[in-house]
Image (cartoon, rainbow, N blue to C red):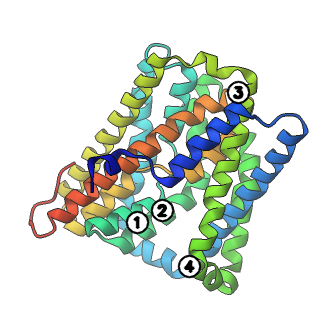
């Protein structure tokens, strides 16, 4: 693969950038803003309904069996990430604007991403079944844990209200439970059309991105974003990812996991879900500088794709070596 292909954005990121540009040039306002908001809410509900319908009961049972691996991944995702985010508090008001730091802290509370974790684990020759179970379980528990963690770590900033839990329950948890209840009847149909239905995942995110950044454009919030804080954000996001990759790799090796399990831990424990994060931010931070709050997640997502793609290829090249590759 050429050097250019290693750093260029993927198709989804390109679509997001195009959507942000559209919101900057042609933001939705007035009646159209209400229509797009309703469409985004419906798409989010459908997204979590399909996630519930995809996950089989067998996957849940299988996930529970490898409890040591999942415990390490959950500790990295929902404990270590928020702790590191809180440790970056001195950046707020200095290198980063307060909304950017809030966004960085929020991404630290998010669950792992399923599709990317499984794909990179497969490329690297890791335990794909464990990665699938762990990342899926992370997404499930994230529906509960992310709002609670967000309330805990952001309470001092006044950027979160527990009233947002009601919106999470109605627009995310309730559709997910409905999908899980109907899974025995529609699960096979949904799995057979997984590729076609993946457009729902990405389409819902793009709808939310458009409404969020339209509101940001109309409020004039982009005038608050200078080049210095933006560069600091890229540096902070890259450093955060590098730190988590190193910690998960060292912890997995030190705890005596097999090479395949180590790979699953590294890729599942170091990533954050954009598909879950942007809809949640839309519900949790209504009335705040939402465009700037979701920007750290979008930056982190692209960095994690490029870095983990390179790391997965490195693992794959070392497949015959007895030593684990250290990020």
Using the rendered view, name the quadrant where residue 302 is placed.
Answer: top left
| 134 on left or right of 31 | left
Q: In which quarter of the image is residue 179?
A: bottom right
SS assignment at label 1: helix
Q: Name the residue under label 3.
A: 217
Please report contact status of discs 1 and 4: CB closer than 8 Å, yes or no.
no
Asked if the residue at tag 4 contacts the one at tag 2, i.e. Cβ–Cβ closer than 8 Å, the answer is no
* 219 or 76: nearer the viewer: 219
- Measured as percent of width and height from the top left, residue 125 is found at 26, 70
Which residue does the numbered mark 2 point to in the structure image? 114
Q: Mark 4 points at which residue?
A: 56
* Res. 118 mark: 1
Residue 265 visible in the displayed image: yes
Looking at this rendering, what residue extends furthest in the top direction? 94
* The N terminus sits in image quarter: bottom left
| Spatial CA span between label 3 and label 4 | 42 Å
The answer for how far apart the CA atoms under marks 1 and 4 are is: 16 Å
């Amino acid at each position: 693969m050429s050097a250019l292909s290693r750093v260029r954005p993927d198709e989804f990121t390109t679509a997001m950038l195009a959507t942000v540009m559209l919101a900057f040039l042609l933001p939705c306002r007035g009646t159209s803003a209400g229509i797009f908001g309703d469409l985004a809410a419906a798409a989010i509900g459908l997204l979590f309904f399909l996630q519930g319908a995809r996950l089989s009961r067998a996957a849940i049972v299988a996930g529970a069996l490898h409890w040591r691996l999942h415990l390490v991944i959950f500790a990295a995702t929902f404990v270590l990430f928020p702790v590191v985010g809180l440790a970056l508090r001195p950046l707020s008001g200095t290198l980063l604007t307060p909304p950017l730091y809030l966004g960085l802290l929020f991404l630290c509370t998010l669950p792992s991403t399923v599709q990317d974790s499984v794909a990179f684990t497969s490329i690297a020759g890791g335990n794909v079944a464990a990665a699938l179970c762990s990342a899926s379980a992370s997404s499930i528990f994230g529906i509960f844990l992310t709002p609670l963690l967000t309330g805990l770590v952001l309470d001092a900033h006044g950027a979160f209200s527990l009233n947002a839990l009601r919106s999470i329950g109605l627009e995310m948890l309730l559709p997910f439970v409905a999908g899980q209840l109907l899974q025995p009847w529609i699960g096979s149909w949904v799995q057979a059309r997984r590729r076609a239905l993946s457009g729902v995942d990405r389409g819902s995110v793009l709808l939310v991105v458009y409404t969020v950044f339209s509101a940001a454009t109309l409020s004039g919030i982009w005038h608050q974003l200078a080049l210095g804080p933006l560069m600091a954000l890229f540096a902070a996001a890259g450093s955060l990812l590098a730190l988590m990759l190193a910690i998960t790799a060292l912890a997995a090796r030190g705890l005596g996991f097999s090479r395949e399990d180590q790979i699953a831990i590294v890729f599942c424990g170091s990533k954050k879900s954009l598909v879950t994060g942007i809809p949640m931010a839309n519900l949790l931070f209504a009335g705040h500088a939402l465009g700037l709050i979701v920007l750290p997640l979008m930056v982190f997502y692209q960095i994690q794709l490029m870095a983990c793609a390179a790391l997965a290829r490195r693992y794959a090249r070392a497949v015959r070596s007895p030593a684990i590759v250290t990020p």
